[in-house]
Image (cartoon, helix red, strand yellow):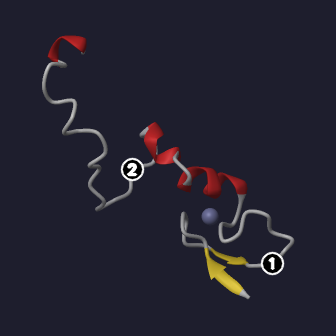
Amino acid sequence: MKVKCPTCQKETEWSERNPYRPFCCERCKLIDLGGWASGENAIPGEPDFSQQEDDNEGNHSLH
Ligand SMILES: [Zn+2]
C-alpha cells in the first residue's frame, strides 16, 4: 500500500518495515513533529500564527 508522505508528498510504502510511516523517512517525521519551529522549513501559503500575539507587548527591548 502506498501513501503520500505528509511532509514531502513523496509516495512511500506503508509497511511494517517502514518505522516512520506514514512518513517516507526519519527526517520527514521529525520535521512534522516540530522541525518547522527551526524556521528553516517554512510552509508556503501557511501563515505562522504560533506565539506571535503574545509577544507583541512588553518585549520590545529584548531584541
Ligand atoms: Zn517525506
Q: Nearer the viewer, residue 9 or 47?
A: 47
Which corner quadrant of the image does residue 61 belong to?
top left
The CA span between labels 2 and 1 is: 29 Å
Residue matched to label 2: 42
Judge left or right: residue 8 versus residue 24: left
User: Residue 6, percent across and down?
Assistant: 54, 69
The N terminus - image quarter: bottom right
User: Residue 30, percent across and down?
Assistant: 62, 50
Residue 15 numbered tag: 1
Q: Residue at x 62, y 57 (%)?
A: 28
Residue at the extreme left: 57
Q: Nearer the viewer, residue 48 or 51?
A: 51
Number of residues whose C-alpha sits closer than 10 Å to that of mark 1, classed few (under 14), some (14–19) or many (20 or more): few
Split into quadrants, the picture shows ligand 1 in the one at: bottom right
User: Residue 54, percent across and down?
Assistant: 21, 34
Residue at the extreme right: 17
Q: Is residue 14 above or below residue 58?
A: below
Judge left or right: residue 60 versus residue 9: left
- Secondary element under disc 2, as helix, strand or loop, is loop
Q: Residue at x 53, y 45 (%)?
A: 35
Residue at the extreme bottom: 1
Choose mark 2 or mark 1, whichever is in front: 1
Number of residues whose C-alpha sits closer than 10 Å to that of mark 2, classed few (under 14), some (14–19) or many (20 or more): few
